[in-house]
Amino acid sequence: MSIKYWSQAGIGLLVLVFSTLVSWYEGSALLDHTWEWRYSAPFSEIVHGSVTGTNDIVALDFFVYAAKFSPLYPGMMIISASYLFILVGFRLFKQRGFLISLALLGVNYLTLSYVISSSPTAGGNTLFWLFLSVGVVMIVAACVIHAFPYLRLKRSFNQ
């Protein structure tokens, strides 16, 4: 594998780890806002039933809270994870398999955008538009690359 591939993967991982840590920190404000536990702690309710104290809150709920009220770093998480999925998919699959995986990832993002489409928060609306636009771009890219043979992806990585 070439230095181009590993440098792209390394930068993508660094951005993903950084944005994950910042999102986790921003979401930890959920511990201070007890009135928000009912609406922003779905994983805690699945695990513990009802949330009665800070010890009942699961760490995944920090990401839900961060996505609802400060979506910049959760958005960076989505974009960097998408980039890493595309990079690994391009490396692992042949032309047809990569296009199928790209289209399926786009469909997953469209489904997620539908799930959060009725969010009453500004962060939820921002993530809705992010999921929608990334999903549409992925599906359109897969269709365009499949439809036009001269746009076929060339493996530029040294194998």
Image (cartoon, rainbow, N blue to C red):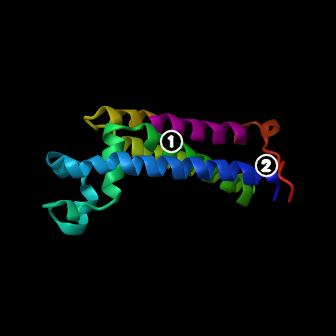
Q: Nearer the viewer, residue 88 or 132?
A: 88
Is residue 151 toward the left or the right of residue 98 in the image? right
Magenta part of the chain: 130-145
The quarter of the picture where the C terminus appears is bottom right
Q: Is disc 1 placed on a helix, strand or loop?
A: helix
The reply to whether discs 2 and 1 touch (Cβ–Cβ < 8 Å) is no
Report if residue 115 is visible in the image. Answer: no
| Vertical placement of residue 20 versus 132, above or below | below
Please check the rendered image and state whether residue 71 is part of the magenta-colored stretch, yes or no.
Answer: no
Residue drawn at x 78%, y 37% is: 151
Is residue 34 toward the left or the right of residue 129 in the image? left
Which residue is the site of mark 1?
76
Residue drawn at x 45%, y 51% is: 21
| Residue 54 image point, x, y percent | 20, 60
The quarter of the picture where the N terminus appears is bottom right
Residue drawn at x 36%, y 50% is: 63
What numbered label is drawn on residue 4? 2
Q: Please, what is the three-letter code of the amino acid marked with disc 1?
A: Met
The residue at the far bottom in this view is: 48
Report if residue 43 is visible in the image. Answer: yes
Q: Please, what is the three-letter code of the amino acid marked with disc 2?
A: Lys
| Residue 28 image point, x, y percent | 31, 51
Q: Nearer the viewer, residue 9 or 120?
A: 9
| Residue 66 image point, x, y percent | 35, 44
Please check the rendered image and state whether residue 144 is part of the magenta-colored stretch, yes or no.
Answer: yes
Is residue 149 toward the left or the right of residue 79 in the image? right
Q: Considering the whole magenta stretch, tell me its main secondary structure.
A: helix
Residue drawn at x 31%, y 38% is: 69
